[in-house]
Amino acid sequence: MSLPAIAVKNLVKQFGETTVLHGIDLDIPQGKVSCLIGPSGSGKSTLLRCMAFLEEATRGTITIDGEVLGFSESAQGVRERLPAATNRAIRSRIGMVFQQFNLWPHMTALGNVSEALKTVHKMSRKDAEDLAMAQLVKVGLESRAGHYPAQLSGGQQQRVAIARALALKPKIMLFDEPTSSLDPELTGEVLNVMRDLAAEGMTMVVVSHEIGFAATVGQQISFLDQGKLLFTGAPSDVFRKPRNPRLEQFLDTYLDRGASMLV
């Protein structure tokens, strides 16, 4: 049996006196789409940011393909930061797409996707732009390669952001509510790209309120509430027979939007 792509063990995250994640244990399987659902403020995005080491957990460990990221922790709870080079190497396997697109406004779509290839990976301009164009083709934006962000719709900007992450050839893609700022039509553009990635076998962790997407594309669904992981299971378990009263209450709110027709 293969190692989990990501293994989260007894993860605790505190901001000052406030605990936002309470002892999370979660395995993300290789080559699958795992969706994190739950009400706003439940800790989903914080958990995702910890997986990417954009937030440092207070306690617990995260491993990527069996390698510890960030901090090791002894049985006695003693934490030790791993060398920066080790963390950089492990983090390079992870791509992340955020709620906001964070594109460089003074660069074209092609420039946004190729910039890190040139500056971080030291690729030649031609090689970087060839690879960047291939990723724009992948997300259906080759005809917009020369356009600046202000000339692109929100959905197109988010697809450029996905292409930028994919250009670095990650093994794992993390999505933090990638459609939350888009209207329904533009949301569909982005979700279709994500469906294509799922069909290719990309390991993905998706924080989203798009319950229909979770129901039809997600292969593992995890429900968080008030910083606690209350349930993890297959979509059929989550959507057809909720086992936890809080999960059932949450789904009642969303399934009346039509997602129930998809499961």
Image (tube, rainbow, N blue to C red):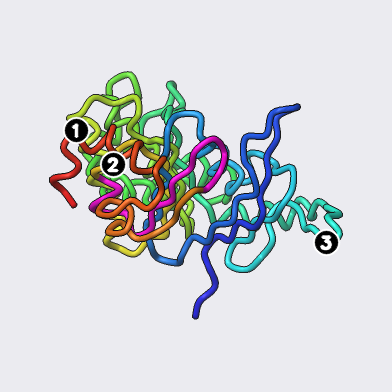
User: Residue at left 38%, top 47%?
Assistant: 132
Q: CA distance from mark 3 to mark 2?
A: 38 Å
Q: Would residue 151 be counted in the magenta stretch?
A: no
Q: Which residue is mark 2?
A: 211
- Residue 85 left/right relative to 207: right
Residue at the extreme bottom of the image, as rendered = 1
Amino acid type at image mark 2: Ile
Amino acid type at image mark 1: Arg
User: Residue at left 76%, top 53%?
Assistant: 71
**Number of marks present in the image shown:** 3
Q: Which mark is residue 257?
A: 1
Q: Position of residue 191 (x, y in %)?
A: 26, 43
Reply above or below: 2 against 152. Answer: below
Q: Which residue is mark 3?
A: 74
Q: Earlier in the sequence, mark 1 or mark 2?
A: 2
User: Residue 185's quadrant in the figure?
Assistant: top left
User: Residue at left 25%, top 54%?
Assistant: 240
Reply above or below: 195 against 68. Answer: above
The answer to whether mark 1 and mark 2 are in CB contact below 8 A is yes
Magenta segment range?
213-229
Amino acid type at image mark 3: Ser
Helix, strand or loop for disc 1: loop
Q: Would residue 220 be counted in the magenta stretch?
A: yes
Helix, strand or loop for disc 2: helix
- Residue 185 left/right relative to 47: left
Confirm whether residue 126 shows in the render: no
Residue at the extreme front of the image, as rendered = 245
Q: Which sits in the foreground, 101 or 111?
A: 101
Confirm whether residue 71 shows in the render: yes
User: Residue 15's quadrant in the figure?
Assistant: top right
Q: CA distance from mark 1 to mark 2?
A: 9 Å
